[in-house]
């Protein structure tokens, strides 16, 4: 009784033969010091990149590792970048809080000086009499 090929698989090609072909192609590309990618391996093996991603995830991970883009490495680098950005964000928030405090202090000084200018202008115009407190003896 002949073996039926599974859906999406070329007739006469088994999973083990495809896996062997993929391994040989990967080894050949690595030995030839050629650029390796899932697309280049798929093209050389005569399969689609989707087949490698969906049917042979271990092969896809091996290719990514050889490319220096393993899932774990990508996740770790993204996590590290996120931690750096969080630290920058924290430092900027602290700086922002300090600047807001300084702004409030300067605004208060500015308001006090504006009142003082108004008083001095009124006193210099001669229309306002200055009342000085008397010292009791």
Image (cartoon, helix red, strand yellow):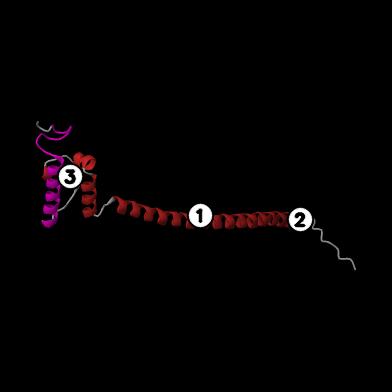
Which residue range is magenta in the image?
4-31
- Left or right of 6 in this view: 91: right
Quadrant (top left, top right, bottom left, bottom right) of the N terminus: top left
**Camera-side residue: 132 or 2?**
2
Q: CA distance from mark 3 to mark 2?
A: 90 Å
Q: Which residue is mark 2?
A: 126
Instruction: Look at the picture and state if 94 lies above or below 7.
Output: below
**Camera-side residue: 58 or 90?**
58
**Who's the residue at 10% across and 34% down the image?**
11
Does residue 22 belong to the magenta stretch?
yes
Question: Which of the 4 image quarters holds residue 7?
Answer: top left
**Who's the residue at 30% across and 54% down the image?**
73
Q: Earlier in the sequence, mark 3 or mark 2?
A: 3
Q: Earlier in the sequence, mark 1 or mark 3?
A: 3
Q: Label 3, secondary structure: give it.
A: helix
Single out the mark in the foreground, 3 or 2. Answer: 3
Q: Label 1, secondary structure: give it.
A: helix
Q: CA distance from mark 1 to mark 3?
A: 44 Å
Q: Earlier in the sequence, mark 1 or mark 2?
A: 1
Q: CA distance from mark 1 to mark 2?
A: 50 Å
Q: Which residue is mark 3?
A: 39
* Percent of width and height locating residue 49: 19, 41
Q: Label 2, secondary structure: give it.
A: loop
Q: Which disc number belongs to residue 93? A: 1
């Amino acid at each position: 009784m002949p073996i039926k090929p599974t859906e999406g698989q070329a007739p006469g090609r088994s999973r083990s033969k495809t896996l062997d072909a993929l391994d040989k192609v990967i080894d050949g590309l690595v030995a030839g010091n050629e650029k390796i990618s899932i697309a280049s391996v798929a093209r050389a093996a005569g399969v689609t990149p989707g087949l490698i991603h969906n049917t042979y995830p271990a092969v896809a991970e091996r290719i990514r590792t050889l490319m220096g883009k393993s899932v774990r490495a990508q996740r770790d680098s993204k996590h590290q970048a996120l931690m750096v950005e969080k630290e920058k964000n924290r430092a900027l928030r602290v700086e922002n809080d300090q600047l807001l405090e300084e702004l409030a202090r300067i605004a208060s000084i500015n308001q006090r000086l504006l009142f003082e200018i108004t008083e001095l202008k009124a006193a210099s115009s001669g229309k306002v009499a200055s009342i000085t407190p008397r010292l009791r003896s």
